[in-house]
Image (tube, helix red, strand yellow):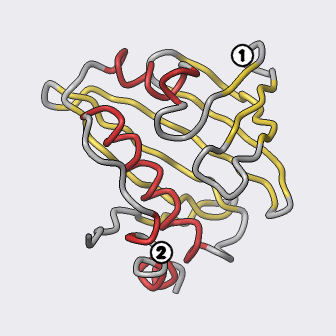
Amino acid sequence: MSRFPTGRLFRTEKGSDLVLTRTFRAPAEDVWASITEPDRTARWFGPWEGDAGPGRTVKVQLLFEEGAPWYDLRIDACEAPRRLAVSSLDESGAWHLELLLSEVDGGTELRFVQHLETEDGIGEIGPGWEYYLDLLVASRDGTTAPSFDDYYPSLKAYFTDLAQ
């Protein structure tokens, strides 16, 4: 199956923002539940455990990564049902993410933003987020989950070119 990239890159004073969007025919509260409730995040990203709240750290399992590892995810902001900001640090560096929900034409638009300190590796990062967001879509509408092979390496050049 051929997948089409939706990501855009915006330069900021602190680096760059990689922005991807998806639109759902559902109220913001329902989409919010899909990105914050552990039983629902398990359907497309992975479950999490811990005492969630701004300034706190939870453990998240990456079900769709090799070995399904657990890692720490800090909740930087949680403004239900509009904004979730999280961050983590791993061997690849720092990850700063925001998920922004807004009501649009009777549905909800999800803007997924990764705040990048550097654009290095965007050719791998972009296809990965496209894949995860399409897993979210599939988990919500009951369609077959996509394969990562449909995203990478075929979308790598698109994202690498954004950084040019």
Camera-nearest residue between 164 and 20: 20
Q: Callout 1: few (<14), some (14-19), or many (20+) C-alpha neighbours within 10 Å?
A: some
- Please name which of the two marks, 1 or 2, marks the residue nearer to the observer: 2
Q: Amino acid at mark 1?
A: Ala
Q: Which mark is residue 90?
A: none
Give above or below for 122 relative to 17. below
Q: Which residue is mark 1?
A: 52
Give above or below for 130 relative to 27. below
In the picture, measured across the screen, residue 146 lies left or right of residue 124, that is left
**Residue 141 percent across, percent down from the top left:** 24, 34
Could you give the CA–CA distance between mark 1 and mark 2, rounded to whole angstroms?
32 Å
Q: Which mark is residue 152?
A: 2
Residue visible at 59% across and 36% down in the picture: 46
**Residue 147 percent across, percent down from the top left:** 41, 61
Camera-nearest residue between 60 and 104: 60
Q: Amino acid at mark 2?
A: Tyr
Q: Quadrant of residue 26?
A: top left
Residue visible at 73% across and 19% down in the picture: 54
Camera-nearest residue between 72 and 84: 72
Quadrant occupied by the N terminus:
bottom left
Secondary structure of the residue carrying tag 1 is: loop
**Residue 51 percent across, percent down from the top left:** 77, 12
Give above or below for 50 relative to 132. above
Give above or below for 57 relative to 30. below
In the picture, measured across the screen, residue 115 lies left or right of residue 145, that is right
Secondary structure of the residue carrying tag 2 is: loop
Residue visible at 54% across and 80% down in the picture: 163
Q: Callout 2: few (<14), some (14-19), or many (20+) C-alpha neighbours within 10 Å?
A: some
Residue visible at 31% across and 32% down in the picture: 140
Labels 1 & 2 near each other (Cβ < 8 A): no
**Residue 142 percent across, percent down from the top left:** 26, 35
